[in-house]
Amino acid sequence: MAAAEVARQGEGCRTVPLSGHVGFDSLPDQLVNKSVNHGFCFNILCVGETGLGKSTLMDTLFNTKFEGDPASHSQPGVQLKSSTYDLQESNVNLKLTIVSTVGFGDQINKEDSYKPIVEFIDAQFEAYLQEELKIKRALHNYHDTRIHACLYFIAPTGHSLKSLDLVTMKKLDSKAHLPFAVIGSTEELKIGNKMLKARQYPWGTVQVENEAHCDFVKLREMLIRVNMEDLREQTHTRHYELYRRCKLEEMGFKDTDPDSKPFSLQETYEAKRNEFLGELQKKEEAMRQMFVQRVKEKEAELKEAEKELHEKFDRLKKLHQDEKKKLEDKKKSLDDEVNAFKQRKTAAELLQSQAQQAGGSQTLKRDKERKNNPWLCTE
Amino acid sequence: MFKGPVESKNEAAMSELVPEPRQKPVVPMKPTGINTNLLGYIGIDTIIEQMRKKTMKTGFDFNIMVVGQSGLGKSTLVNTLFKSQVSRKSSSWNREEKIPKTVEIKAIGHVIEEGGVKMKLTVIDTPGFGDQINNENCLRPLDLEFMKHLSKVVNIIPVIAKADTMTLEEKTEFKQRVRKELEVNGIEFYPQKEFDEDLEDKTENDKIRESMPFAVVGSDKEYQVNGKRVLGRKTPWGIIEVENLTHCEFALLRDFVIRTHLQDLKEVTHNIHYETYRAKRLNDNGGLPPMTVETEENHESNL
């Protein structure tokens, strides 16, 4: 069907009376049932120096003994330790995640102590944002790790807040909820006939749940019994939205363009996509150029080598020819010598035969003379 | 493992020092699977009350669209369902024009309140379009096509209108025929089998699916029957009581849509239909610009 005009009545809808019982007042129950089936999750971040009793307080708040070793004081930097527990009370399933700082305030240089903490909180927002922006996403079953409340532990020195505390709290304030933290650590002791949580000092016993003694009860009321749902919602609608808005604006998304006309998401995506494609093309071009350049260089190199080879070949050839010529010359001269010798030999033989014919007697006479005078030479 | 004394004992011990812990709300319990007996009462279960209070304050939205030939009693049915004038009857349309010039879809919102719960109800009427199951013929092929497309993007609840024209046997037989036809054509109506979350859901929904489509009669007129004022239709052979289960299945439809599955209808729409639409829309758009290395690689391969 073509885009038919849907005429909507304005936000000021009329209230109409009901003439009987309809039954949608069961809606909150339906909603609650669904939520209960789905389960809840709550994430607390505990920031404070080592030894202030963070884990003890958590144990007390949630009336359980959470496993974990007490932290040491010799950490290289501030780290965050996260553990998740499944708690159940009547039919409510709570997935509780407690994140604790380890080594906070143990360093000599405490300037950047707050940084790992802020980074951690941001990382959880980022993870949620990534999931939210996926095309195929599973938000309904997503394990939400965003911090709902941050408990900041202040040392009971009696003085005002330390500068480290001030700086850190200021940084965290925009990122998470900071209900005011109190110290109340405790073990169970027997007082009179009842088992109570308390700390025993020589001068008396501090009862944790006695409001006159400490604010523990107030904290528990506020955190769990009254505002847990509120904290979860505020984290999502305020802190997370703020993070999301900053992040998206950083990436270049806007709701309105410079002329204050509303940008449609489609236009933004198209613009981003074209920008990306443009960049990609540029990179491709650059790569191609480089490739061509390299090819040219290589070709030149190869040509050089070829030339050299040719020259070498020519040189060798010439050498070879020279040698050959020399040898031929030598051969010729030898041949000449041989011929000359042959000629002389035949000439000599001829003379000898002539001499024999011309004077056989002369030869005898000569021979006689020679007998008598061996030293005579008659040639 | 967290083991400890029973809750009530600690509560008694605590009550001396602390104010009375809040009243635990009455909510039907599901069988507990995890073994976690805590050392004492924490108060986690108060989140139920917190949530309930919050939703009562903000109120609810509900949007319902009625599709079918005019004259079948769509507006009357909606008005009967919500016991108020939330839908304008076709008699208020200009009777001269039997066929509206354009298919103008009107969405009209009203606020209704009951038991402290405020609901903004928006009724979307589609005059002269689509088809409720006309009990003269079977479903026309065009309508089946139309319903098939619709069932993929929205929760469809088929309803047999003017059920007072059929006897009980005719009703059962017709219903079976319609269900078969829907099944054969791959039209999944709400509650869809594929979205049953667990065995409990499945059993409950199977029963409902077996009795759908509901054969209903709507009326906004009251009559006196056996000393009671009831909504009904007056005929020469008797008064058909709308909310009487032996007369028609209106009450079943109402309980199903409003009293038990209202929230579920909204959740299926949000978590499944909307997400499907969103994913498809973003995909057609060429996907999102890259934010991380992984998506960048994906994007490149799409080029």
Image: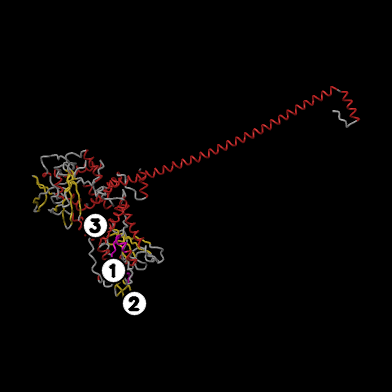
Q: Bounds of the magenta span?
A: A169-188
Q: Left of A16 or right of it: where is B189?
A: right
**Please, what is the three-letter code of the amino acid marked with disc 2?**
Pro
Q: CA distance from mark 2 to mark 1?
A: 22 Å
Percent of width and height locating residue B206 = 25, 49
Q: Left of B284 or right of it: where is B123?
A: left
**Near-viewer residue (B14 or A297):** A297
- Is the N terminus of chain B in the top left, top right, bottom left or bottom right quadrant? bottom left
Chain letter of disc 1 in the image: A
Q: Which mark is residue B55?
A: none
Percent of width and height locating residue B274 = 26, 48
The residue to which callout 1 is attached is A216
Lower sequence index among marks 2 and 1: 2
Which quarter of the figure has residue A125?
Answer: bottom left
Lower sequence index among marks 2 and 3: 3
The residue to which callout 3 is attached is A32
**Please, what is the three-letter code of the amino acid marked with disc 1?**
Phe
Chain letter of disc 3 in the image: A
Q: Which mark is residue A202?
A: 2
